[in-house]
Image (cartoon, rainbow, N blue to C red):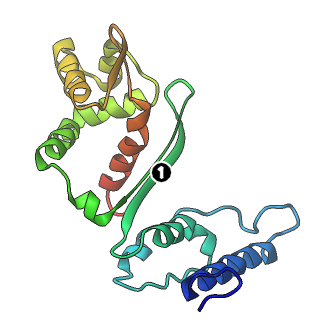
Amino acid sequence: MKSAGLDTFDDLRSRIDALEARLDRVERRDGTGEVAGGSDVAVRGQLARMHGNDDVVDENPDRLWALNELKRRIPAPGGVLYTGAVTYGADLQAQWQWAITRDDALDVDPNSTAQSLAALAHPLRIGILTAVLRGVQTVPALSQELGITASGQAYHHVHQLAAQGWLSALSRGHYEVPVARVVPALVILAASGGTP
């Protein structure tokens, strides 16, 4: 099928789906310019239980905007998207996204991946990473915040995180999470924190 500038039936279906979603949003407006019921973008484990169902049905299609766009842009066998716009530390901003196909995600160097994850595989390192994301920058402040009594122990863990790129030195004794690692760190923390 080729007419009216449409290349395929899928293009037509995609445009109809987009129009239906827009119409649905307009019909749900409550007169304030906001969608009735507020913004709910937290989609949790119910989608993980779909097991191959290509048609995602949800009572609020706006909640699935990222998933639907990912499926449109990366066809089967699919891929993964992680993105974020966050304020962290002392009013620093991180806006970041990365989409990767399933095959590219599986084509990793096992050694470097293991080393990067191993740097996070200690409760004190997770504590250090989260404290730095909250704005704590010095090793003495990190030690006090986390109850680390030996400064050598704190420096050891900070250096382990820095060696794998999870922390970088701002100046002598001051550390930050590099902006390119802020969203990935939050994704890893959220994903490993248990069932959504």
- Residue drawn at (34%, 55%), measured in percent from left and top? 191
Residue sitting at the far bottom: 1
Q: Residue 134, how many percent across, how many down?
A: 46, 30
The amino acid type, in three-letter code, at marker 1 is: Thr
Q: Is residue 105 above or below residue 87?
A: below
101 or 28: nearer the viewer: 101
Q: How many marks?
A: 1
121 over 173 or under it: above or below: below
Look at the numbered disc 1 and give the secondary structure of its residue. strand
Q: Is residue 75 above or below residue 16?
A: above
- Image coords of residue 24 (percent x, y): 73, 78
As drawn, is 168 to the left or to the right of 91? left
* Crowd band around label 1 with a 10 angstrom C-alpha radius: few (<14), some (14–19), many (20+): some
Quadrant where the image shows the C terminus: bottom left
Q: Residue at x 40, y 18 (%)?
A: 137
Residue 55: x %, y % from top left: 49, 85
Residue drawn where x is 52% and y is 71% of the image:
68
* Among the 4 quarters of the image, the one containing residue 47: bottom left
- In the image as oriented, which residue stretches furthest toward the left? 111
Residue extending farthest right: 31
Front residue (pair 195, 14): 14
Q: Who is closer to the viewer here, 107 or 51?
A: 107
Which quadrant of the view contains residue 168?
A: top left
Q: Is residue 196 visible?
A: no
Residue 32 seen in the figure? yes
Q: Which residue is mark 1?
A: 83
